[in-house]
Each structure stands twice: as structure tokens, then as C-alpha cells.
Amino acid sequence: MSKMRRGGRSPAASSSSSTSMAHVKAIARDIEALGLASSFDADDVVSHLRSRLPHRYLRQKVRPLTAVADRALHLLRASSPSSPSAGALENNSDGSTSTSDVEPEFDVTSSLLRDKYAKLRAAKPAPAPAPNEEKNMEIESANEKKKRTLGSPEENGGASGKGDVAVGREGPRFRDLGGMRGVIEELMMEVIVPLCHPQLPRWLGVRPMAGILLHGPPGCGKTKLAHAIANETGVPFYKISATEVVSGVSGASEENIRDLFKKAYRTAPSIVFIDEIDAIASKRENLQREMERRIVTQLMTCMDESHQTLRSEDTDPEPETSEKKPGYVLVIGATNRPDAVDQALRRPGRFDREIALGVPDENGRLEILSVLTQNLRLEGEFNLMKIARSTPGFVGADLAALVNKAGNLAMKRIMDRRKSDISCKLNGEKVEDWWRQPWSPEEIDSLSIIMPDFEEAIKMVQPSSRREGFSSIPSTKWEDVGGLKSLRKEFDRYIVQRIKNPEDYEELGVNMEVGFLLYGPPGCGKTLIAKAVANEAGANFIHIKGPELLNKYVGESELAVRTIFSRARTCSPCIIFFDEVDALTTMRGKDGGWVVERLLNQLLIELDGADQRQGVYVIGATNRLEVMDPAVLRPGRFGRVLYVPLPSAEERGLIMKALAKNKPIAADVDLIALGHKEACRNLTGADLSAVMNEAAMSALEEKQMSMDNGTSYSKPLIIKTSHFEKAMGKITPSVSEKQISYYETMSKRYRGAGIEDLDLTSTSTVNNSKLGGFVGASVA
């Protein structure tokens, strides 16, 4: 064996050499087919091959493959079209590249086994390419032709390996984004101009923005905004999902990040977009594996270098007169969990700006719907504003799903009508083939989507934010409340007009109360009032049932409060309604109340607005004002305490009319007069609703009794005055005289003294004995 090493090459070595050369030629053919030979080095070529032909090269080791690719590049550049070596690189006659006889240079199989397998392969016919491979090759070829028409790889995104995309002129633009006008104006000055004219910040000596962190609920348009930035600027755009970075091999994840930024540097100015960045950039103190910490550290290191220039000594303001190119790389991250991202990344120099893309308001939804419906065939009176008002909590993805659902419902409506028309013309044997009948041009031209299709689709599409704690804007209007004009005026002044006309209030510098507390007897319509305010204002609405925030685990209740206010700030203007707020704000210092105390302290911090609370309005409702902590009731928190009394005789009639809106009431029934009757005295809104339902049941029982006696009942079901009188005899007031006296006394005391002078504890003690334990009763 030693003689053979010194004296010459063994047959195995010769076979390995020929196999290695065949491998080089095979890679050279692929490089030539993909058009990579002109302006790429070996590293870029390997990235191309592994991303475009993964079934051939993804499982091969990078370093040996890079060496072979380097040899293939030298072979291609040394050869000419007329030389024999070039002819040897041509593909097979069928256009496919055969690699069946190629073994990688780094294969460790023994020479004897290699020879044996080579003979076995030679004895078998070469297998035809798999259908998937043929499709992949066709797609790759089409994509390559498309990219060539856009320009050279250097101009359109550099080397396309893992994590980069060639940016053309197709795709979303700023004009395709609705509800982001303010965000786009900021980006235009701070991002678009420095990317399109990098010589400006360099000439002024200003460091351009290093990174942007886009955060918001799923479907709000974070990824689409990043693509729009790239399409507006026309710079190379390198998109990668965070999960693509992670590798099971130690050090490979960090290498993937370095390679990504290396490609971005070569084609600077450029954009690196990391989607779901929280998957690789979570807080290091919460990470369990050392590899995850190294990934975060590597990302921070690359971002520190991303805004530095490759030639900092170049001060020529005109790029045409300088051969040196600025190395400005903008990093855009997207996440719906910004609090999970490591704090070291959220500092200036890395992610300089954090842009919150919240749930769009009514005007934002109108803009999005205008963009989504501009290519639809709409017919008749189409009120997009009505759709926008009916879709609170919908983000861009939800509105897109709504538009698609409306289109599907329109198709179903059209097909049902066509089936009915054709079935009348065809005989029984061909009815099942109605869908095979051809469409005439006139029939197709008459097809369109109408407003009822959207109204039906709204009922079927559930917005994603509904699962995040948001509620739909209630359908309750002030007409459904009945009376309470003074309360309506208060809310219109302090909330509704401020939401609808914020410029007027800002111009005058008005800083008004944003916390309201409704108190009064149970069943008087406190919850109904809050819903009516949300409906009239058209703001996003979060409905919290007080006890649902309580959690047995330490810290979870406080986290729930912080999360609610954080969501409200993200989608301001927003109204937070705490129903039965006394469950969360009981007086501190009681035995066993430490759980509520911790939650109350967090609620006080949020109500104070330690974090900016502009555009977030808080309404609470309770019938147990005496058990609430006085600290909650001072100005700046629940500063405006409004009493909701029992309805007057006139208001009872208005409530009856509101309740009878969708019921068959006889024409001779005077609901206003019924409200003035002595039997309705001291009835709350909830009691009047019970009277209305009992009257309807009386009408139904009358029909059933008539049918049981054998008498035919052909009259339509209507509710008469006799039914109301019968119902009033069964319903008694739910609030006693003692309770009414207690609430009236508390209302007078509260109006006559400031909250610091009002001794709610003594009031509660004095009246508890009179009410017979009413203070501990639940809200009706």
C-alpha cells in the first residue's frame, strides 16, 4: 500500500477523481441553468443551490459543497461557448440535468462499495424525473425569467439564498394600505427618504434609523406594511421567518443570522425583515437553552453593525461621483408579543422605533373597505360607512375575510336563483344537471354583490380581536334606554364629542375626566347606558365583568388588568366598561382581601395614567358604592360619579315603547298611559321588561286556552291592554322603599360633599341595618 501511495494513483483514487470531476460538471450545469455564473461568488451560489434545488443540495455539507462550487465557477469562467469543455456542460437532450451518476466529493464510502453501487446503477435504466421535480424545475425556470426581466440580481435584491427576496415593482404599496395614514406619514420622512437618498443622512452626519419593531394583533397588516416599504423604496428586501433561522446544529443558527446580514451588506441600502421575531429574540432571562441566548446576542451584534457605513470616510454627497456605496441596512421586526422581545433589542440603535398597529377605528375600517372593494362589482346603494360601523374589532385580515365571505354569499344567492329558474324549464330527468347549463354574456354581466350579502356576512365572520377580549359595539341606542336625558348629555359632552371631534378639544387644551362611575338601584339601566354610549361614539369597546379578572395565581390578576389597558391603548379610541366594578375595588385593609388589594393597586395605577391613557375612557357600574375604596373615587380615576335613579312615570312609558319595538302590540294600547299607572310605580327598567314578557305570555296562554276548548283561533297574536294589566298584577317592584330611600340619601350626600368629605363607611353601617342585608345582595 505504501508503494502504491508513492508510486502512483490507485484505481479507487482514479475513480474518486473522475467522480469528483463529474460532480463539478453537474454543479456547473446547474449554475449555468440558473444564471449564476456572472456575478456571484461561491458562497452565494451555494445559497442559491440549496434554496432553489433543495432536493439535490440541501442535505450536502456547506463547506465541501462551497469548494466544489468554486471549482465549477472557475471551470465556467475559463470555458467559452465554442470550447469542448463548454459542450460537456450542456444538459441532456430532454432538458433535465441528470445527477444519478454523481457522488459528492466528501463521500466516505469505501472504494469497493462505490464501484459495486456504480455497477448496479449502470445496469438499471435511469429513472424518470419525479412529477414534483419537474414542477419544481418549471417553477424555478419561470421565477428566474421573471427576475431577469426586473433587472440584475444586484439591483433587485442581491443573491437569493435563504432569507432573501428579489423586490420587483409588484406587490402592496402605501396606497393599498387603509387605516395607516398617520403611520405612513411618519415612515415617509424617517425611513423612505433615507433609504432612497442615503447620501442625505451621510452628508449631514446623522445616523439613519437602524430598526423598526411593528407590533399589533394578528392580521393588522404588519407584514403587508413591511412589503409596502420595500416596494416603495425599491431596495433589496430580505425576508425571513424567525423559525427558519433556528437550526439543530450548534452554531448554525448564529451563522444563518450572519449570512443574512452579510448578504444585506453587499446590496446596501437594503431591508431585512424578520417575521415573528419574538420566536428568536425572547428575553434572555426566560430562555432555558444556551443556544437561544447566543441567537439573541448574535442578532444584537448584527443590528449594531447594520446602520454603519461600509466606507465611513467617503463624504461625497452625490452617489454618482463616488464609487463607494453606503452600507445602511434597515431591520424591520414584526411580532404580536412585543413584551416578550428582549429589552436590549428595544433600545435606540437597534429597534429605534416601535410602531403599534392596533385595531382600526371606524374611519380606518372605512378606508380598508374602500381599498378591498375597489375591484368588486357592487350594485345598488352600497353604504360602506354602515359596514364599517357594524364591524368593530375587525382588523385588516378580518375585513378581507368579510369581503370574501360576502362574495361567496353572492355566488350562492345567484346559483340558488339560477337553479330555481332552470329547474322550472328542465324536465325531471335533467334537473340534477342544472349547473352544467352555460352562462350567456348577458347573464354574467348582470351579476354583482349587493348590500344584503355584506350584512349577512357580518353575522358569520368572527373578528380575531373578539378572542382577544374585545366586544362588538352593542346595538343598543339611546332610544332603547328610554329617558335619562341628563345622563345622555353628560356622556355626549365628555366622551362622544371628544371621540368624534378630538381636534377641537386639543386646540383648547381641554383635559377632562375620562373615568365615570354609574351607581343606583339594580335594574335601572346602568349597563344599558354604557352600551348606548359605546354605540353612539362608535369606538372600540371592551366589556369586563368585574369578577372575571380575579385569578387564584399570584400576579395573574394584575397582569390581566395591565393587558386590558394595553389593548385599549393600542386600539384607541376605546371604551372600557367594568360591570360590577365593586368586586374589584372593595375597601383595603379587610382580612383576607389581599388578592383584591393587589388588583386594586394595579387598577389605580392604570386609572392614574402612569402609562399614557389618551383615548381610553373608563366607565364603571355598581349598586354598592358604599363598599368601594374611596381612593378609586377621587378626580382622575372614577372622578365623575353619576346617579342612575328609578325611572319617572314619563320615562317608564318611554321604556315600555322601547321594549315594545319588536312585539305585536294592539293599536289601542297606550304605553305612555300604562307607565303612569299606580301598578307601575317604583318599577325599574328590568321590572318593566318582565312586565312586557309576562304580557306576551298572557296573550300566548289566551290562544292556547282557546284551542284547548276546541275553538279555532285564526286571529293574529297581539298583546292587548288586558294582557298588560294582568301582567302588572303579577310583577312587584324589585327595589323596596327602604332601598330607594337609601340610594336617594346617598345621592344627596354625594352631591353635597366632596369625595374626601364623604364617609361612605358610616353611611353603609347606618343603612345596612335598615336594608336587612341589601348591601350584600348581587346586582340584578
Image (cartoon, rainbow, N blue to C red):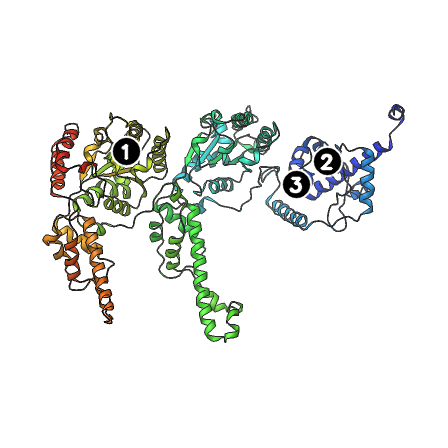
Q: Quadrant of the C terminus?
A: top left
Q: Residue at x 67, y 35 (%)?
A: 46
Residue 276 drawn at (x, y percent): 49, 36
The disc placed on residue 684 is: none
Position above or below: 363 against 162: below
Residue linked to disc 1: 584
- Disc 2 residue type (three-letter): Leu
Q: Of the residues shown, which amino acid type is indicated by label 1?
A: Leu
Judged left or right of residue 305, residue 664 is left
- Kindly identify the amino acid type of the residue bearing the numbered disc 3: Pro
In this image, 17 relative to 388: left or right? right
Q: Is residue 664 visible?
A: no
Outermost residue to the front: 709
Find disc 2 in the rendering and name its residue.
Answer: 73
Distance (Cα) linking label 3 and label 2 = 20 Å
In front: label 1 or label 3: 1
Q: Residue furthest left?
A: 678
Q: Position of residue 509 (x, y in %)?
A: 25, 34
Task: Label 2, secondary structure: give it.
Answer: helix
Tag shown at residue 54:
3
Q: Counting other residues with Cα less than 10 Å from the Cα at mark 3, is it few (<14), some (14-19), or many (20 or more)?
A: few
Disc nearest the viewer among 3 and 2: 3
